[in-house]
């Protein structure tokens, strides 16, 4: 039995790093179906994905062109949902701003690395490309952990 039914990547605005992470994981095979989404901590109104982030996704055979930013809410937290933030400060903010946050980890914490995700906001297209490659490696590591958890659950 799988541990999570849903995974939500969280960034500040939900317009570049978290939708890129969502697209990467959606293009990865997992043993069980899992709903993958992204949300933001500071979303005043729906916005599309950053054009540079979308260009990098398209260059890598993916797209989030229909994505609109959405705020994280109290209803997103439950025992069957995994929340992965783009940095530890975002995780800390969730832990203090929400009443019942469960299963919340910084992506780097979840995959056990000290590496820091370099937010490309305001940078050149090449900065978004570097961020994508960094996210791809981290999301692949997270997907491997999820697959291992699913395999272990099947063997029990």
Image (tube, rainbow, N blue to C red):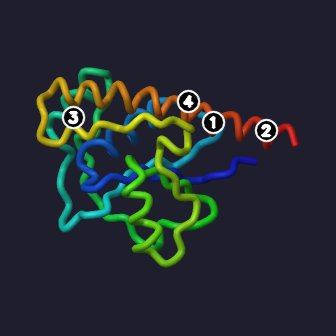
Q: Earlier in the sequence, mark 1 or mark 2?
A: 1
CA gap between label 3 and label 2 equals 36 Å
User: Which residue lies at the image location 41% right of the left edge and 33% below the top edge?
Assistant: 24
Q: Which residue is mark 4?
A: 29
In the rendering, at what x and y percent does residue 58 appear? 25, 26
Horizontal side, residue 124 vs residue 7: left or right: left
User: Which residue lies at the image location 46% right of the left edge and 32% below the top edge?
Assistant: 138
User: Which residue lies at the image location 23% right of the left edge and 48% below the top edge?
Assistant: 15
Q: Earlier in the sequence, mark 2 or mark 4?
A: 4
In the rendering, at what x and y percent does residue 118 appear? 29, 37
Q: Which residue is mark 3?
A: 54
Horizontal side, residue 101 vs residue 152: left or right: left
Q: Are marks 1 and 2 in contact (CB under 8 Å)?
A: no
Closest to the camera, between mark 2 and mark 4, is: 2
In the rendering, at what x and y percent does residue 13 appear? 25, 55
Q: Quadrant of the rendered structure where residue 98 is?
A: bottom left
CA gap between label 1 and label 4 equals 13 Å
CA gap between label 1 and label 3 equals 27 Å
Q: Are marks 3 and 2 in contact (CB under 8 Å)?
A: no
Vertical placement of 110 versus 75: above or below? above
Give the position of the C terminus as an image quadrant: top right
Q: Earlier in the sequence, mark 4 or mark 3?
A: 4
Vertical placement of 27 versus 40: above or below? above
Label 1, residues with CA under 10 Å away: few <14, some 14-19, many ≥20: some
Closest to the camera, between mark 1 and mark 3, is: 1
User: Which residue lies at the image location 38% right of the left edge and 53% below the top edge?
Assistant: 10
Which label sits on residue 145? Answer: 1
Q: Are marks 2 and 4 in contact (CB under 8 Å)?
A: no
């Amino acid at each position: 039995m799988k541990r999570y039914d849903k995974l939500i990547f969280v960034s500040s605005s939900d317009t570049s790093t978290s939708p890129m992470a969502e697209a990467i994981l959606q293009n990865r095979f997992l043993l069980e179906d899992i709903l993958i989404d992204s949300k933001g901590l500071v979303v005043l109104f729906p916005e599309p994905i950053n054009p540079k982030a979308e260009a990098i996704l398209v260059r890598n055979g993916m797209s989030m062109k229909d994505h609109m930013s959405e705020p994280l809410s109290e209803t997103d937290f439950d025992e069957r949902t995994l929340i992965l933030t783009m940095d530890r400060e975002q995780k800390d903010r969730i832990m203090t701003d929400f009443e019942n946050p469960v299963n919340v980890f910084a992506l780097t914490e979840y995959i056990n690395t000290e590496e820091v995700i370099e937010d490309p906001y305001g940078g050149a297209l090449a900065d978004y490309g570097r961020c994508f490659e960094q996210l791809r490696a981290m999301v692949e590591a997270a997907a491997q952990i999820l697959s291992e958890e699913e395999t272990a659950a099947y063997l029990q």
